[in-house]
Image (spheres, rainbow, N blue to C red):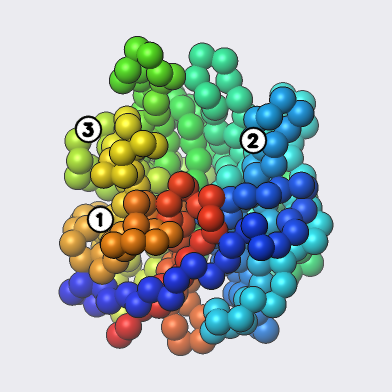
Amino acid sequence: MGGTMKWEKLGLVFRPTEHTLPNRCVEFAQSPQSLVLPDRVRVYFSTRERDSVGKYLSHIAYADFSRNMRQLLGISTQSVLPLGGLGCFDEHGIFPINVLRQDDRVLAYTTGWNRKVSVSADASIGLAISHDDGQTFQRYGTGPLLTASLHEPFLVADAFVRRYEDVYHMWYIYGTKWQKFNEAEPPDRVYKIAHATSSDCIHWQRNGQQIISDRLNADECQALPTVICLDGIYHMYFCYRQAYGFRKDSSRAYRLGYAQSNDLKKWVRNDELAGIDVSSEGWDSQMQCYPHLFECGGNVFLLYNGNEFGRHGFGLAVLHA
């Protein structure tokens, strides 16, 4: 697997506006993340409702697919995990959620966010646990597992957790600064990818160091890492963009980045080997973001979002050997 990854795009596989979602959600299916079950693949995503003052709240829902990902079997009809209470880190939304099976339960690493005054939001990583194959989750506690700290001062988010040998590994992002790039507009954030380890899924050791090199500039934003091991090599996909102007200028918007490692410590970035890019037209022609890798039935799949940060749903690609 040392050369370019070869992906076949299978198109947009879930459109939120075609379904009745719980919590009065009407648009967005962001950050699709898989739970492979014996008879299906459950894909979690973050969707949105408008609150009483017209602002967004982010909720978790899921869609069940056949194991070959060709058939939609159904969607969640109830709340998967209610939002946090007054003043909690996840009061205004959960986006994204990453799930991991552990014996007879499913762990969910959540990114909870809450609104702020001087900047738009803060985020922390929480934990919830399911005992019904991921249909519903209960919080492990009211507060977060990982949050802002001395060397990671803002926006700790986007956890992706996998177990290799006897160690749990978490790849996540942390904010390095907020900055006003244009005096007439609100501040924008900058965040990077980091790594933490744990022996029990709850207590994490981290050092707040950026592990993926920048490609654009020092203010490059890196988000939502996902890792898979194929033939002894670890492959990471993530998304990256310019810190400013990304909402209106598609050339500054999210693209998928790629890095690989032999030891889970040193990562070599080479986006040219990613094997996937924006399309010439259609739902992923302006942006690709929020990737998620998983294996099922002998196939390696890549879920991801396209234009407008997943407003129109999520798509799928399959890896060719």
Residue under circle 3? Answer: 218
Compared to residue 33, the image places residue 46 above or below, namely above
User: Residue 208 location, x and y as percent?
Assistant: 38, 36
Check disc 1 and give the amino acid type.
Answer: Trp
Residue under circle 2? Answer: 56
Quadrant containing the N terminus is: bottom left
Which residue in the rendered view is the most extreme toward the right?
A: 78
Q: Secondary structure at mark 2?
A: strand
Check disc 3 and give the amino acid type.
Answer: Ala
Q: Secondary structure at mark 3?
A: loop
Disc 2: CA contacts within 10 A as few (<14), some (14-19) or many (>=20) = some
Q: Which label lies toward us, 2 or 1?
A: 2
Compared to residue 180, the image places residue 20 above or below, namely below
Residue 76 in sight from this viewpoint: yes
Q: Secondary structure at mark 1?
A: loop
Q: Residue at x 64, y 76 (%)?
A: 72
Residue 107 in sight from this viewpoint: no
Disc 1: CA contacts within 10 A as few (<14), some (14-19) or many (>=20) = some
